[in-house]
Amino acid sequence: MIVGVTTEETPVESVELADSSESQDSTESQDSTAEVVDRLRTKARQTSDIKKAHRSFWRELPILVLIALVVAVVIKTFLVQAFYIESGSMMDTLIEGDRVMVNKLSFRFGSVGRGDVVVFDPPASEQQRDSESLPGAILRNIAESIGLSQPSSEFIKRVIASEGETLEIRDNVVVVDGEKLQEEYLREGSVMPDFGPITVEKDHVFVMGDNRNQSRDSRFFGTIPEGDIVGRAFVTVWPPSRWGGL
């Protein structure tokens, strides 16, 4: 007796669909993995860039600080500098506590003129500061440049006469080359004893404070060399209520 065996055949189309679906899933999985890897790489690069930027900043910071110090010292030494007024010799033009800006280039390209308010190095007879060492001077200049210390000057006066001019004081009036000066800037009540006559020598100036009653000036220590002039005070910058030109 012969038994017939029936064999079921799997449709070819069904197999191909299954293979296609598996292939698509595999491709999508690979794409997803690649995207994750790309994101991780991008994040790693960004993190690395941030770390490099931080390291670069801290490496460059000392150089930036040094450059800023050099610029500040150059400006203070050769261009402009703020000075603190600690005496009343220039009242009421300047009062104690005022801060003025001094232009150090004024007399490099021009001459000293009558009426200029100038800051100058203390005359030899008036020097009270002990001799300063070079390192001390460097540290003081740096401190003044960055605001850790404020330079002060009692030696800020007004130029009254220049080289070749003859000055004298008669009857409470300053006379230069025979002409009486009109000094509107004088503090009210100023009294001047008779003085002179004196002729200002070459490359020197005769200076006095606006508060003649309380000013130690050329009447006491003589004329000053033009080379000792630090610069011309041109504006009051502090306090704000006293802002204005000189």
Image (spheres, helix red, strand yellow):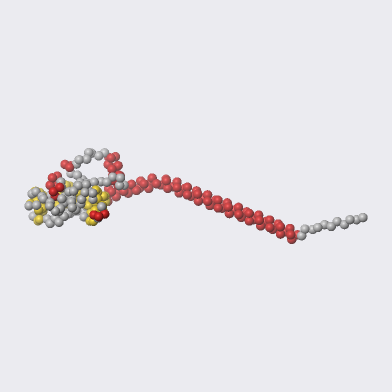
In the rendered view, does 216 fall on the left or right side of 39?
left
Q: Residue farthest to the right?
A: 1
Camera sees residue 150: yes
Q: Quadrant of the C terminus?
A: bottom left
What's the residue at 10%, 53% (across, down)? Answer: 174
As drawn, is 156 to the left or to the right of 193?
Answer: right
**Foreground residue among 210 and 65:** 210
Residue 228 in view of the camera: no
Q: Quadrant of the N terminus?
A: bottom right
Q: Which residue is depicted at the point 23% across and 56% down?
A: 244
The location of residue 158, given as percent across then percent down, is: 17, 51
Which residue occupies 21% across, 47% down?
Answer: 86
Measured from the top left, where is residue 226 in percent x and y?
18, 49
Q: Residue at x 60, y 54 (%)?
A: 32
The x and y percentages for residue 191 are: 11, 50
To which quarter of the image does residue 148 belong? top left
How far across and how far down the image is residue 196, in percent? 8, 48
